[in-house]
Image: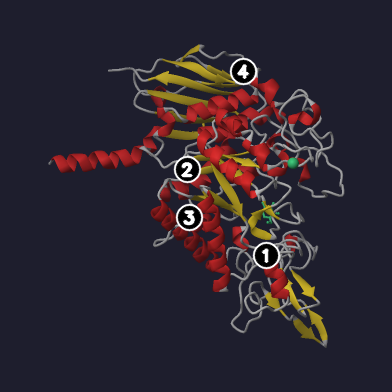
């Protein structure tokens, strides 16, 4: 009898204490742009080390660093030339070891970017593959092409993500190689077991150094469909695009989300789990970058026999805009929850990254807090791109010798203070210019401004650590949805207290009367807890639930109640 009781307790215990990553706050750092410690105008590892306390201060659990490995920087590190080395622009291996050591002291986990789909064409593996070195000959995807009327053509009609053919002719090897991104990023051949082994060795190398997991780049692109005769099938046209150089020209049924990719994902997860079993410590995680439909993300998470990425990024909220209504938000949230929560009890919410314009530019300056509050209110993991806690905006950048990328605008230096280069660097000319508002809009100023986006962000992270938010695995502890066309709400509660998050998505004053059964019996009033600069209320102000509620345009508030003891 006592055993049954103990087991029951253990079971409830499991339910109520999620694993660290399940409601973690992940923070993406673009290392080139966070802090430059040596004055060369480019951010580096020592710079990141110096700001770990900052991450702790704002409530970050783990930080994901965009690639820091040796690279000729054709795609700013997403073209790796040595997977086991740190690029000198970011520092040395000793700097990395120091970063890990310090991260453990401070209590912020380090997650690295893992780029398995391709390497740089300056990677030794590729150079040896070009030479047909027996060990590396089949490390990449090579094909002699098709001879039509004596003229050589690429093996298929495929178009790369960045435009133009995925196939580039190599004079030396006298064959085409495949690249789903730039010609300087040849795709690995994951049908070659040696490639698979090599990548496990890479994972192990960095796990041994003490990282807590990886963000895996470009997951859907890892495999392409191969015909039995060794040829590659043409993809069908999209009739809505007439530019043969454009990625959207074709429907990517053979170059995205192939079923073999799932096997590799499960293999990596098994590797990470066995690493944990052998070495102890907390769970190591895989965050997977896949702009894929929910049914596919579901499979990257698991199938009936295997587990994969714990956090297949949910980019759903990123397709919302400044015009989105509360109903649109509800639909976007439900798209995920209906599949992933119902089946696996996991959720993650992403609102930005280095490939997409900032929240300011997608939603508007007036919606920074609205969006950050939405992100942190929902149950599960959140992912914040650096600078979004300040509401940084995109910068119109000019092409320079260093960079000419249409994503430069969202990669500008972090705005720390109003000094030279915003405190990012002692160099007056950082690799990308600072946004023009850095003298006003920076960490130093926002820290001392009561309702700044920075302080709102910080209080949201505190909220995520309250009992009402922590017991999210219990479905009855949360609810969400559109109360009206423009008011979105999230409710989070424990047996003791609860929070009601109300967000006015629209530009008009909204009013609302709570229906009788909206709150648990006995709750009579609420207290404003987090208020933004759009609000006429103050923290600590009371609200009687029988009163009519008013929300100003774009106002978002967190209200708190205490469950009466009966
Ligand atoms: C996705 C990364 O986020 C992006 O920055 C990069 O260009 C491509 N993958 C290719 O690695
Ligand atoms: Mg530097």
Q: Nearer the viewer, mark 3 or mark 4?
A: 3
Q: Position of residue 414 (x, y in %)?
A: 71, 34
Q: Residues within 10 Å of mark 4 (few under 14, many from 20)?
A: some
Instruction: Indicate which disc, 1 or 3, sits on the residue closer to the N terminus.
Output: 1
In this view, 85 is above or below 149:
above
> Which structural element holds mark 2?
loop
> Which structural element holds mark 1?
loop
Gap in Å between the C-alphas at discs 4 and 1?
A: 47 Å
Q: Nearer the viewer, mark 2 or mark 4?
A: 2
Gap in Å between the C-alphas at discs 3 and 2?
A: 14 Å
Q: Nearer the viewer, residue 38 or 115?
A: 38
Q: Nearer the viewer, residue 430 or 151?
A: 430
Instruction: Indicate which disc, 3 or 4, sits on the residue closer to the N terminus.
Output: 3
Q: Which residue is mark 3?
A: 301
Instruction: Indicate which disc, 2 or 1, sits on the residue closer to the N terminus.
Output: 2
Gap in Å between the C-alphas at discs 3 and 4?
A: 40 Å
Evaluate if marks 1 and 3 touch, with contact meaning CB atoms under 8 Å apart.
no
Q: Nearer the viewer, mark 1 or mark 3?
A: 3
Q: Which residue is mark 4?
A: 535
Q: Nearer the viewer, residue 192 or 428?
A: 428
Q: Which residue is mark 1?
A: 251
The quarter of the displayed image where residue 328 is located: top right
């Amino acid at each position: 009898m006592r055993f049954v009781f103990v087991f029951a307790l253990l079971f409830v215990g499991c339910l109520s204490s999620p694993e660290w990553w399940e409601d973690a706050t992940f923070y993406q750092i673009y290392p080139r742009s966070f802090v430059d410690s040596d004055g060369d105008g480019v951010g580096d590892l020592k710079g990141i080390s110096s700001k770990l306390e900052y991450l702790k201060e704002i409530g970050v659990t783990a930080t994901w660093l965009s690639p820091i490995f040796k690279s000729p920087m054709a795609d700013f590190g997403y073209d790796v030339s040595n997977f086991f080395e740190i690029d000198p622009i970011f520092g040395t291996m000793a700097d990395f070891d120091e970063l890990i050591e310090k991260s453990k002291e401070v209590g912020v986990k380090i997650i690295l970017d893992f780029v398995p789909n391709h390497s740089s064409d300056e990677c030794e593996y590729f150079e040896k593959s070009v030479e047909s070195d027996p060990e590396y000959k089949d490390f990449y995807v090579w094909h002699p092409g098709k001879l039509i009327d004596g003229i050589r053509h690429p093996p298929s009609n495929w178009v790369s993500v960045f435009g133009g053919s995925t196939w580039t002719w190599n004079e030396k090897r006298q064959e085409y190689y495949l690249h789903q991104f730039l010609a300087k990023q040849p795709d690995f051949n994951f049908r070659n077991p040696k490639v698979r082994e090599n990548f496990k060795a890479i994972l192990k190398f960095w796990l041994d150094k003490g990282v807590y997991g990886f963000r895996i780049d470009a997951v859907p692109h890892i495999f392409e469909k191969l015909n039995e005769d060794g040829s590659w099938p043409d993809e069908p046209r999209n009739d809505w695009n007439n530019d043969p150089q454009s990625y959207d020209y074709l429907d990517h049924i053979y170059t995205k989300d192939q079923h073999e990719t799932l096997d590799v994902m499960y293999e990596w997860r098994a590797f990470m789990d066995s690493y944990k079993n052998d070495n102890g410590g907390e769970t190591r995680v895989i965050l997977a970058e896949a702009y894929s439909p929910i049914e596919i993300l579901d499979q990257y998470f698991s199938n009936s026999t295997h587990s994969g990425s714990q956090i297949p990024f949910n980019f759903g909220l990123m397709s919302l805009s400044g015009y989105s209504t509360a109903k649109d938000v509800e639909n976007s949230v439900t798209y995920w929850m209906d599949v992933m929560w119902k089946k696996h009890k996991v959720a993650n919410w992403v609102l930005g990254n280095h490939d997409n314009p900032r929240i300011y530019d997608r939603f508007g300056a007036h919606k920074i807090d609205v969006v950050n509050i939405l992100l942190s209110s929902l149950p599960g993991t959140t992912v914040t791109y650096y600078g979004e806690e300040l509401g940084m905006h995109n910068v119109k950048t000019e092409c320079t010798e260093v960079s000419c990328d249409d994503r430069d605008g969202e990669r500008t230096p972090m705005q720390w203070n109003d000094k030279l280069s915003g405190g990012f660097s002692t160099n007056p000319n950082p690799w990308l210019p600072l946004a023009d508002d850095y003298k006003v809009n920076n960490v130093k100023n926002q820290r001392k401004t009561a309702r700044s986006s920075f302080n709102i962000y910080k209080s949201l992270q505190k909220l995520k650590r309250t009992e009402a938010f922590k017991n999210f695995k219990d479905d009855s502890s949360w609810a969400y949805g559109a109360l009206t066309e423009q008011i979105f709400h999230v409710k989070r509660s424990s047996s003791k207290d609860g929070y009601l998050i109300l967000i006015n998505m629209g530009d008009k004053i909204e009013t609302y009367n709570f229906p009788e059964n909206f709150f648990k019996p006995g709750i009579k009033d609420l207290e404003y807890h987090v208020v933004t600069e759009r609000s006429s209320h103050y923290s600590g102000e009371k609200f009687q639930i029988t009163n009519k509620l008013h929300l100003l345009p774009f106002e978002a508030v967190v209200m708190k109640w205490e469950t009466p003891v009966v």
